[in-house]
Image (tube, grey):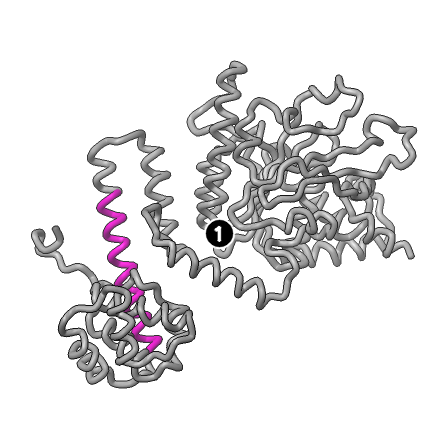
Amino acid sequence: MDELLGRKTPHSAPAEQAVIGSMLIDTRCIPEVLEKLKADEFYSKLNRDIYETINTMFSYGQTIDPVTVLDQMKVRGVYQEGNESYMAEVMRVTPTAANVLEYAAIVRDRALLRRLGEAADEINNMVYEGSGEAETMLEAAERRIYALRQGRNVGGLIPVSAVVQNVFDTLSEAAASGEKIPGISTGLPDLDRVTLGLNKSELILIAARPGMGKTSIALNLALYAAMNLKKTVAIFSLEMSREQLVTRLLSRASLVPSQNLLTGQLSEQQWREISDAAQALSATDIRIDDNPSLTVSEMNAQCRRVPNLDLVVIDYLQLMQSAGSGHSWSNESRTQAVSDISRMLKIMAKELNVPVICLSQLSRANESRQDKRPMLSDLRESGAIEQDADVVIGLYRDGYYNKECENPNLAEAIILKNRKGQTGTVELLWLPEYTTFSSVEKHREDDE
């Protein structure tokens, strides 16, 4: 098509050849090149075949030189007549392996230009075919461009060999980091042990009746990730204002009771503690949006523009609008809307490749039971929420219903669903004066 239109497809044959030549001349540069380049970024099929062969051989620790590579190409069924002379020519014209990363950067740049051109053609076709509303098309276009920015293709069948390589890379990263859990730590060790942290592309639902501390535990997790782990966190608050949220964060970070922060009745020591906490909080990368009428698409669009995003928190699901809707719902349409929203949230988590924590109200069904602990069937309005979520955590405090109970501040995080395996109950300590939760074990250590 490009040839018919007289357009030249962006690529650099000399740069591609220089990358291959460098890898054959000096095998020490291979690990660096494999980090920078993917096989599908080569325009020439022959260069792609040679690169994939070298990649596979390197993964299995085999000796790499022109003879062994040619032999392996025969084994893989990609060898053709004339490959020997091509490889010899490539090595002859490569000036030096020292500049291999510059050659790789050129190959990547041209590949990105080709993909950008393909995306532009797809968007153009979509617009002129009139397939959908303008808002839907804009969302599809943004998704396509965001995938390019992240260095990913949208959709398409991927060979299992490439996926195996991705899994091995993830395993290697996990082993090198020395962390006991693969995801972002919650700061609550007992919860980490069950959930294995907050993992990429997961939708994590925290569900409870009003007043149980949903917002508090979500802010706990956000603050720990941002302050202790230096992560970038986006918080969408559809219920509370930015100022209310930051007041809670300050109370948690300074361990000054939130009541004192609200009334301004502070001792000199408390002023110092709040000042230190404010400084530490200001140094974190937490972004807050308190627009009460956001749709998932709008949240997703904002998140795409945040560099190096690590975690998203949404408070809370039942206040959200599905695209193009208002607030007048019948029960049936509301159920459908919540189903759509939960599905879009899962897609958002996958696309952004970050954990998305969404808070959800529970129905009143538990109020009529003797045991008021939450169950999956209590999720309001839709079984789709339960289906889309990777982890569902129900919060329960006996002290909420029974002020005379033995330990009114003992809370339970009940893991109702966990795609990674284990379910069960994790005990936490509710600290009402700071509107926050603490690990029972950690609190005992602090008291000693």
Q: In this view, does 311 lie to the left or right of 437?
A: left
Query: What residue would you read off at disc 1?
Result: 306
The residue located at (31%, 29%) in the rendering is 133
Q: Which residue is situated farthest in the front direction here?
A: 75
Locate residue 94, reporting x and y percent.
24, 82
**Magenta residue span:** 100-122
> Does the magenta segment cover residue 59?
no
Residue 289: quarter of image:
top right
Please, is residue 384 above or below residue 8 in the view? above
> Closest to the observer: 241 or 205?
205
As helix, strand or loop, the secondary structure at mark 1 comes to: loop
Q: How many marks?
A: 1
**Dividing the image into 4 quarters, which one contains the C terminus?**
bottom right
Q: In this view, does 396 lie to the left or right of 166?
A: right
Please, is residue 364 above or below residue 88 in the view? above
Q: Which residue is situated farthest in the top direction here?
A: 330
Locate residue 108, reporting x and y percent.
31, 65
> Closest to the observer: 319 or 262?
319
Q: Identity of the amino acid at label 1?
A: Val
The residue located at (58%, 27%) in the rendering is 318
The residue located at (55%, 47%) in the rendering is 355
> Does the magenta segment cover residue 106?
yes
Q: Is residue 24 visible?
A: yes
Please, is residue 293 above or below residue 419 in the view? above
Locate residue 393, reporting x and y percent.
66, 37
Label 1 Cα neighbours within 10 Å, binned few <14 / some 14-19 / many ≥20: few
> Closest to the observer: 275 or 252?
252
Locate residue 138, reporting x and y percent.
34, 38
Q: Can residue 11 be seen in this view?
A: no
Q: Is the magenta stretch mostly helix, strand or loop?
A: helix
Please, is residue 104 above or below residue 182 in the view? below
